[in-house]
Amino acid sequence: MTPQPAKSAPQRIALEGAYVRLEPLEPGHAADLLAVSTMEGGAERYRWLFSNAPTSLDDMQARITAANAGSDLSVAIIDKSTGKALGQQSWMRIRPEHGSIEIGGVYWGLPMARSRLATEALYLFARHAFDDLGYRRFEWKCNNANEPSKAAATRVGFTFEGIFRQDMILKGESRDTAWFSMLDSEWPALRAEYQRWLAPDNFDADGQQKSRLATRG
């Protein structure tokens, strides 16, 4: 079968889940994002990102304005139980002509990290890319020294593809970049497992999972 391009690049729309809502990133999200970035342990989560932790509300708002002027499309991750923005992520390397797109610029604040909120935020991107827009390839990249990010990629169903050695210089250090991907042929089985795992009856009253996400077959 002849490979087909995707329908379009993602648009600035909200994506609704059971636990989170992904909204186009706006300066109005700055106060919430500053709060999670500057809480105890929050700044350390910028260790592997292109930027350091924000230092003020003006700084956070300026970053959002700059992000929206670029080629990536960033969203705020809203906890539906509180209405607060707890993180952000972006569509990057948007190449509809090749049917390929990346999730990047991921900052999942401590209140949502390693929780169903983070997993659903990833799932909503994958579902939109594959089911709504017809992408063939969904990418995840990270610093090869970032072991938590590599473990997260594998947990949610990405396949490790290899390492681009000395790919860039970031914050004064040489970065090797690990590449991961998820393909449209793999998505139906992954989607079913996401939906099973994210079902409310898979969590106890404290929001703890009853069974693990099983994406590796």
Image (cartoon, rainbow, N blue to C red):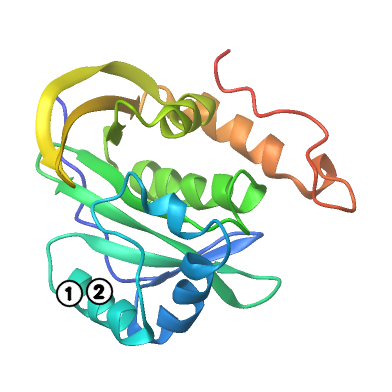
For residue 106, side relative to residue 120 (left or right): left
Question: What amino acid type is highlighted by mark number 2?
Answer: Arg
- In the image, residue 98 above or below residue 127: above
> Residue at point 36% right, 71% down?
13
Question: What amino acid type is highlighted by mark number 1?
Answer: Ala
SS at badge 1: helix
Q: Quadrant of residue 180?
A: top left
Q: Nearest the camera: 14 or 83?
A: 83
Name the residue tied to disc 2.
Answer: 63
For residue 95, side relative to residue 56 (left or right): left
Q: Quadrant of the N terminus?
A: top left
SS at badge 2: helix
For residue 22, side relative to residue 26 (left or right): right
| Residue 123 % position (x, y) | 50, 45
> Residue at point 58% right, 49% down?
113
Does residue 1 appear in this view? no
Q: Nearest the camera: 147 or 208?
A: 147
For residue 39, side relative to residue 182 (left or right): right
CB atoms of marks 1 and 2 within 8 Å: yes
Name the residue tied to disc 1.
Answer: 66
Q: How crowded is mark 2: few (under 14 residues within 10 Å), some or many (20 or more)?
A: some
> Residue at point 47% right, 66% down?
37
Q: Residues within 10 Å of mark 1 (few under 14, many from 20)?
A: few
